[in-house]
Amino acid sequence: MRQLLTLTLSDLRQRVRDRSVLIFAFVVPLALMFVFNLVFGNTDDIDLKPITVAVSAPADDDLAQVVARVVRDLDGQGGLDVTVHEVDAATGRQQVEDGDAAMSLILPDGFGPAAQSGKPVTVDAVRGDEAGIESDIVLSVVDGVLDRFAHGAVAARAGLVEGISEDQLSKLAEQASSGGPAYTLAEGEASDEQLDSGAALVAGQTGLFLMFTVSFGVTSLLLERETGTLRRLRSMPMPAWRIVASKALVSLTLGVVASAVLLAVGGFLFDASFGSPLAVGALVVCVSAAATSVMFLIVRVARTSEQASIATSIVAVVLGVGGGAFFPVSATGAFAPVLDLNPVAALLRGLGITAGGGGLGDIGTPVLIMLGFAAVMVLLSRLVPDRGALS
């Protein structure tokens, strides 16, 4: 154990002094995150502009007036600045064409009686060329109002079928429709077990550069063979597996430290929280172990350090892009399970679970995928003929 610890600490000191390790583990990914933060950091911030809505509603129609009142009440809700012009249908269309209103809502004569009886009724929405997300919000709220009216008609019809008295039926219909729907405006958030765009980018970049970081520990076997150091190490009175184990510990340590730093700094830059530190730490250790296992396979087949570097780059790009390092990747059919077994994709899934409030007991599937991937790679590295460092 003392020999293993000595070899590990010695290799760690050498790797820390190696500028290429610091560049690929910290400088390049942090620089990319900084650039991505400048480009995409504010894409989730929505700046709502003032909107003018021309509403044409019959003055003697109570339900139509409810729709108009709801649109007026949107002013000041969730940062909206809504101005309502009560006009006739022709004037409303003309205001949209002239650019005096972003959109026009036209409720036809007989809207209320038709809505209460459950008959089809159409509300025309005319949008201008400059209408933006503000008009989408207004339309969404109006759709909710109309759905509430439809529910009232359905409730009244159901009560009629069940034989409810006319007095109760009238109260039921009035309560379901004419009272006006309740609504709230709130900024949407990503669904549980899903990372938002900023957090997904940080996690993806962490997984991508993790593959480069762990390669420095294991592939140093090839460098030591080329420089003659490995021959001297193997001449010492200790088993060869301790040399390999020390490289694995170095790779694992570098991967864990680099990933933790990238997640912390990237989370700060993108204002992202990944949840429980204990659960996130378990994911980082498991994905680092999975990445290190790939390097063992590479070092068995690569004859030189240059070949190992090329193979590492290919594997890192394939696993990183396939796992969603830059953008979400989804697949269907027979290829979908292969993508699910990607340790980078498992990392993003696990961080999505922890970001949604999950703990250690909730990340079993991503952890099993990473550890299973590591076990398969280690097994393959034992089955593949050794043509690399220890041959």
Image: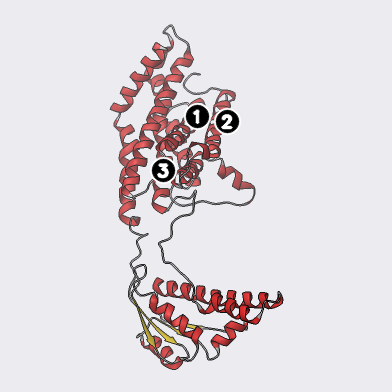
Vertical placement of residue 170 versus 42, above or below: below
Characterize the local packing of mark 1: few (<14), some (14-19) or many (20 or more) Cα atoms within 10 angstroms: many
Which residue bears the numbered disc 2?
376
Vertical placement of residue 262 versus 80, above or below: above
Residue type marked 1: Ser
Residue type marked 3: Gly
Q: Residue at x 50, y 46 (%)?
A: 322
Front residue of 238/299: it is 238
Count the numbered circles shown: 3
Q: Nearer the viewer, mark 3 or mark 2?
A: 3
Q: Which of marks 3 and 2 is nearer the N terminus?
A: 3
Which residue bears the numbered disc 1?
293
Snapshot quadrant of residue 235: top left
The percent position of residue 245, horizontal first and vertical second, equals: 45, 20
Residue 33 falls left or right of residue 69: left
The percent position of residue 8, horizontal first and vertical second, equals: 38, 19
Q: Are marks 3 and 2 in contact (CB under 8 Å)?
A: no
Which residue bears the numbered disc 3?
275
Vertical placement of residue 319 versus 216, above or below: below
Front residue of 133/360: it is 360
Q: Which residue is drawn at 64% across and 82% down?
A: 166
Characterize the local packing of mark 3: few (<14), some (14-19) or many (20 or more) Cα atoms within 10 angstroms: some
Residue type marked 2: Val
Snapshot quadrant of residue 218: top left
Residue 22 falls left or right of residue 68: left
Colour scheme of the picture: secondary structure
Q: Which of marks 2 and 1 is nearer the N terminus?
A: 1
Q: Do the residues labelled 2 and 1 touch (CB within 8 Å)?
A: yes
The percent position of residue 230, horizontal first and vertical second, equals: 41, 16
Q: Nearer the viewer, mark 3 or mark 1?
A: 3
